[in-house]
Image (cartoon, rainbow, N blue to C red):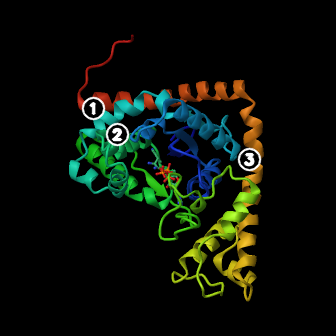
Amino acid sequence: MINDKKVLFSGMQATGNLTLGNYLGALKNWITLSDEYECFYSVVDMHSITVRQDPATLRKRARNLLTLYISAGLDPEKNCIYYQSHVSGHAELAWILNCFTYMGELNRMTQFKDKAAKHADNINAGLFTYPVLMAADILLYQTDVVPVGIDQMQHLELTRNIAERFNNIYGDVFTVPEAYIGKVGAKIMSLQDPTKKMSKSDENPNGSIYLMDDADTVMRKCKRAVTDSEGCIRYTDEQPGLKNLINIYCACSGKTADEAVKEFEGQGYGVFKEAVGESVNAILQPLQAKMKELEKEKGYIDKIIKENAEKAQYYANKTLRKVQKKVGFPERPRI
Ligand code: ATP
Ligand code: LTN
């Protein structure tokens, strides 16, 4: 608990342009939960270098992502929005937790298998131990709840196992966190291949709606989305493309699937796709306007970055010192 509130932690990688999947699966829930919890929202730039990055591009994307968190509605005065690389505790705890994680556990991680297949020329140890750094992110702040898309569930389970293993040896050191997966939007699929998740690193830009896509591009992508030849609006696994569009529509408009199906009963896919495009634009347009405004406020963003890094470091150190003592490191003299 911090300030009598439970703690929430989440993060995103600065590996590309954020998609609607990132927004509906994660960011949107961050905003809903932010009043109830003491929140830490990190730009996890240390995770990003598990695949090769151009340094200047990474720096720019990280700054964009941090600004986007604020543009999407997270108040940086109330929520701790910061760069992971600014708080040394993440790497320090990750090392310790590495020694409490088994190779076999990491070998089972599907994200590792996917990324290793995709980057076969660079299967580095960081890619393999990526979930341990993620566990360190979460456990460092004694986190109660972690809002993520469903694809991160396996990493959350591993985090809980590591925390429980450590607690069983050393006593109650870590809070064991729960995942928070939203009801709608937990997994948004590609518009071009509804069997694949919408991903910011997809090579086909038509499969993803990017948060910075202009209104016409959003509409065009929605109209071109792959559906089927049934021609009838139903919410079923047999029509995965349509189901995905209904999920997007519901997550953006706040309606239920039943309501959406009733609303478009007897109408063609064209009319429905247009409504999907409009519902997405109603969310993206204000976000883009705020982003443009904030990009000009350089001094303000710099101040947020500094103050929040200090706040995060303070809480991180509390846990870290406790852990270091438990595992038997000598007490640090003040340097
Ligand atoms: P990459 O393509 O680089 O692997 P990504 O698009 O999967 O990236 P991450 O940075 O790994 O994005 O994820 C950020 C957050 O967005 C996580 O909480 C993740 O669960 C969520 N998320 C990512 N893609 C989707 C999706 N298609 N639907 C719902 N949530 C998603
Ligand atoms: N692995 C996550 C990003 C991430 C994260 C975290 C999410 C890194 N550390 C801690 C929640 C909590 C992903 O979305 N790919």
How many labels, in total? 3
Q: From what the image shows, is residue 130 above or below residue 199?
A: above
The residue pinned by badge 2 equals: 173
Judge by depth and name the residue closer to the eye, 227 or 12.
227
Assess whether mark 1 and mark 2 are in contact (beta carbons under 8 angstroms).
yes
Tell me the crowding category of disc 1: few under 14, some 14 to 19, or many 20 or more residues within 10 angstroms, Cα based. Answer: some
Image-based side of 194 in relation to 140, left or right: right
Ligand 2 within 8 Å, label 2 CB? no
Image point (64%, 50%), residue name: 31
Which numbered circle lies on residue 288?
Answer: 3
Frontmost of labels 3 and 2 is 3
The residue pinned by badge 1 equals: 326
Q: Earlier in the sequence, mark 1 or mark 3?
A: 3
Q: Is residue 315 visible?
A: no
Q: Which element carries disc 2, helix, strand or loop?
A: loop
Give the alpha-carbon distance from disc 1 to disc 3, as whole Å.
47 Å
Which numbered circle lies on residue 246?
Answer: none
Q: Earlier in the sequence, mark 2 or mark 1?
A: 2
Q: Which element carries disc 1, helix, strand or loop?
A: helix
Measured from the top left, where is residue 35 in percent x and y? 65, 47
Ligand 2 within 8 Å, label 1 CB? no
Measured from the top left, where is residue 129 in percent x and y? 31, 43
Give the alpha-carbon distance from disc 3 to disc 2, as whole Å.
42 Å
Image point (60%, 81%), residue name: 235
Judge by depth and name the residue closer to the eye, 74 or 286.
286
Assess whether mark 3 and mark 1 are in contact (beta carbons under 8 angstroms).
no
Measured from the top left, where is residue 191 in percent x and y? 58, 67
Give the alpha-carbon distance from disc 2 to disc 1, as whole Å.
9 Å
Q: Earlier in the sequence, mark 3 or mark 2?
A: 2
Amino acid carrying label 1: it is: Lys
Image point (59%, 24%), residue name: 306
Tell me the crowding category of disc 3: few under 14, some 14 to 19, or many 20 or more residues within 10 angstroms, Cα based. Answer: some
